[in-house]
Amino acid sequence: MNKFLVAASVAVTLCSCNLTDKKAETSTINPFLTEYSTPFGVPPFDKIKIEHYKPAFIQGMEEQIKEINAITMQRSMPDFDNTIVALDQSGKLLRKVSAVFYGQNSANTNPEMQAISKELSPLLSKHGDDISLNPQLFVRVKQVYDRKVDFDLDKEQTKLLEETYNDFVRGGANLDAEKQTQLRALNSEIAMLQLTFGQNMLKETNSFKLLIDNKADLAGLPASLVASAAEAAKADGQAGKWLFTLQNPSVMPFLQFSDKRELREKMFNGYINRGNNGNEADNKELVKKLISVRLDKAKLMGYDTYAAFILEDRMSKTADNVYDLLNKVWEPTLVKAKEEATDLQAAMQKDGVKGKLQGWDWRYYNEKVMKAKFDINENEVRPYLQLENVRDGMFYVANKLHGITFEKIENMPLPHPEAEAFECKDVDGTHLGVIYMDYFPRESKRGGAWCGTYRSQSYNDTERIAPVVTIVCNFTKPATGQPALLSVDEASTMFHEFGHGLHNLFKDVHYYGVSGVPRDFVELPSQVMEHWVLEPAVLKVYAKHYKTGEDMPTALITKLDKSGKYGQGFVTAEYVQASLLDMDFHVLKDIPADMDVVAFENASMSKIGALPQIPARYRTTYFNHTMGGGYTAGYYSYMWAEVLDADAFQAYQETGDIFDQATAAKFRKYILTPGGIDDAMDMYKNFRGSEPSIDPMLKKRGLK
């Protein structure tokens, strides 16, 4: 993505209103065009309407271009303040509307917003290119960069200058006019293809429905899931039946518990064939076009592959380094996965089921083997993981580590009626920021879980502007009147996204241009938080039975610990396969005209000996992390960061206290606060004293 485009994505929108009329009409009533008069300055979600977005986007782009012109037309010699800082601070309105639009378009979208996205996509792509390819602006930036020793810059200012100059170079500023024209066209096409991929995926996920009208077909399913399916059917106009969907809280427990093998097969095939059904939302040709256009851009920029272009400013630096890590993990993972497959095949035969273990059997028989080996199953654990208690548990961990507190805010504008808002205060009682929590799936929300900001941390002169953070999940929604009981995976997901939230809350930088960190470093703060989820000292605080209030029994905690590494062959294989698939697409030096992306995926998995029962966590046609942008040639980042997080948690363990505040203070100072001011590996070494070892990660997963 063009870094000079302050939108959260280059895919944006426009409604069908008349620009000239609306601009005058909304100048006094459009919430984006005035200061927010809300608690803590959060967006006034209750007052923002569809028709407000387009005028604000248009005016935001116009204002930023005026600000850029003011930089390039001044007669003063270029210096750090009048060029670099002025550029960094430009686009305030565009940044403001983008944060809200993209947050809502992911968590609470509708056809109008999606139409707006497609309409604005080429306009925002052009806007970003108009800045990054502005020759007069680049001349001024380069003059400051070439004379940087003449300015008395601190470390943060130096980093901003270097990042700004490098962003121009990577944005095509050194290309000739003809190649810049080609680059503009490629950027616009990539933006539209990525946007369309994501919209197709949402359509495919929402379109599949498994409707059950025979109660016998519910055999094995937890009562809570059955109740939720009954409510889903009623909402769909099918009262008296049960509706299951491809939303994770529906499809995953169905595959895990349903005794009906033929129905598991139907759900499984629906899930893994999203975007591959030959309909209007089919993504195969789109993916082929997308990877081809990305490669064209890389070659235009002087790189052999798109991965080479992308990885240059990541921690990994090269594709060889990525493959080296993934291959080191894959070898023991495949051994472990084969061992697990043997166990599951035996359990299946014991049930009298003939034939080979299939993908739709894996989760079901893994649950049975877990029960046999460790006398534990998910339904035994869920009653102790009530959502509100898990949430309070992660707040407890943050308080024990950093002294911060969270207090629920009532009468607050919310991004969705189901969301909650909390104020975060630092150890001295000062306001750190606001954090929203949005827990349950809906058709207007994309799948997965994520953390974003409706306002990122910044400065207004010397005043720190506190962030407004949002954590969005898709947990199992309870039936009316019932509590939300999470799985261990869902509890881990909440802690994970909260780690991103802490990163946003603690960040303290003066310039937008140094606020980000490399993609393969950004998962460190989130993944390290997962280590506390099942720590006995933490479970004793939050794992209370939802009916009796009793603590999770010590015997059950022990079972969780003993069983924790079982199944890691499957989990790790899913992840590594997706990471390798992502890389394999983006290290290509040529895209054959007759390329079949599904056949390419099959070949990619075959060459590493992947088990057919374990598809990649994300198959090509619904791999939104890479094909939708964001983690392109970067899905490996979770594994890369896991090497860091396992080593980092060991730092706490070495003190004998997982809540050691001195270690937490170092983690906050060197990892969570500096944004991208320091080199990522330098940040880690400042915290840990040395580069990380891969051994703690392999041991954590039971692979060593």
Image: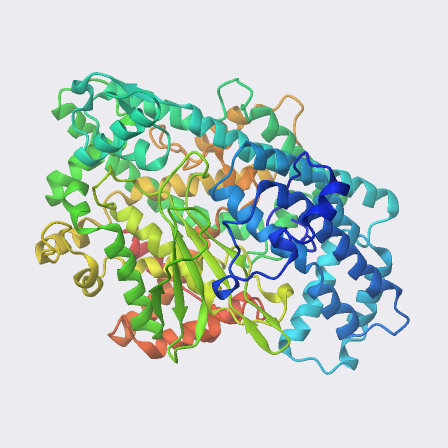
Colouring mode (rainbow / by chain / secondary structure / one colour): rainbow
- Residue at position x 9%, y 52% from top? 548
| Residue extending furthest toward the bottom | 152
Residue 592 placement: quadrant: top right
- Dividing the picture into quarters, in which one does residue 254 lie? top left
Residue 202 visible somewhere in the drawing? yes
Residue 381, image x, y percentages: 17, 47
Residue 371 as seen in the image, left or right of residue 112: left
Kindly indicate the quadrant of the structure image that contains residue 533. Answer: bottom left
Residue 96 pos. (x, y %): 61, 56
For the point 31% across and 64% down, which residue is it?
A: 395
Nearest the viewer among 522 and 217 is 217
Q: Is residue 205 left or right of residue 114?
A: left
Q: Is residue 267 above or below residue 550?
A: above
Q: Position of residue 488 (x, y in %)?
A: 25, 48
Drawn side of residue 80 relative to residue 575, left or right: right
Q: Is residue 632 above or below residue 423?
A: above
Residue 619: x and y in percent read 46, 32
497 or 304, which is in the foreground?
497
Residue 359 in view: no
Depth check, front residue: 614 or 416: 416
